[in-house]
Image (cartoon, grey):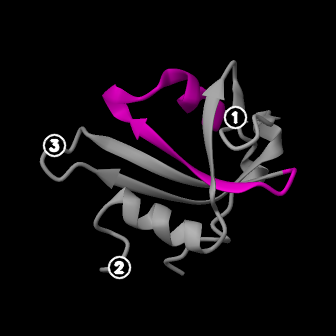
Amino acid sequence: MDNEYAKHEKDYIRAYEEKGYVSHFRVESNKLVSNNNNYEYKPMDVHVVAEHRYEGMSNPSDMSILYVLETNKGEKGTFLLAYGPNADADAAEFFKNIPNTNISDKANINK
């Protein structure tokens, strides 16, 4: 199924920003940290409400996952994680520790 966002992660990020997912985050010491206000979130404080996986067009091992997030403080944003051999191990571990009950597809713009 073709969709208007499938070309690149940036297309999805822009589309989610238009829906209010404007915060950007980094992972430090097994916490998600907001670049906007430096709030720190533990895995249990974060809800993944959509995710999109990409493989590189010229190199299939060049993969990434775009996580669309909502926090327990109402902050909404995205996190782009390299996947596979180029993955940030700390960030990958953080997302692995998010409880399954906090993962849904409720905000997926493809639905």
**Which secondary structure lies at badge 3?**
loop
Quick one: quadrant of the N terminus? bottom left
**Which secondary structure lies at badge 1?**
strand
Quick one: quadrant of the C terminus? bottom right
Identify which amino acid the numbered label 2 is placed on.
Glu
Based on the picture, tell me whether residue 71 belongs to the magenta stretch.
no
In percent of the image, x 32 and y 43: which residue is there? 63
In percent of the image, x 32 and y 61: which residue is there? 8
Identify which amino acid the numbered label 1 is placed on.
Leu
Q: Which mark is residue 59?
A: 3
Q: Which quadrant holds residue 33?
A: top right
Q: Earlier in the sequence, mark 1 or mark 3?
A: 1
Identify which amino acid the numbered label 3 is placed on.
Asn
**Which secondary structure lies at badge 2?**
loop
Q: Which quadrant holds residue 49?
A: bottom right
Residue that carries the numbered disc 2 in the rendered image: 4
Compared with 104, 100 (above or below) is above
Q: Are marks 1 and 3 in contact (CB under 8 Å)?
A: no
Report the side of 15 relative to 68 (left or right).
Answer: left
How packed mark 2 is, by other alpha carbons closer than 10 Å (few <14, some 14-19, many 20 or more), is few
Q: From this viewpoint, which residue is outermost toward the right?
A: 73
Q: Earlier in the sequence, mark 2 or mark 3?
A: 2
In percent of the image, x 35 and y 79: which residue is there? 4
Q: Is residue 69 visible?
A: no
Q: Position of residue 54 (x, y in %)?
A: 34, 53
Q: Which residues are magenta?
A: 72-96
The CA distance from mark 2 to mark 1 is: 29 Å
Residue that carries the numbered disc 1 in the rendered image: 32
In percent of the image, x 76 and y 40: which residue is there? 37
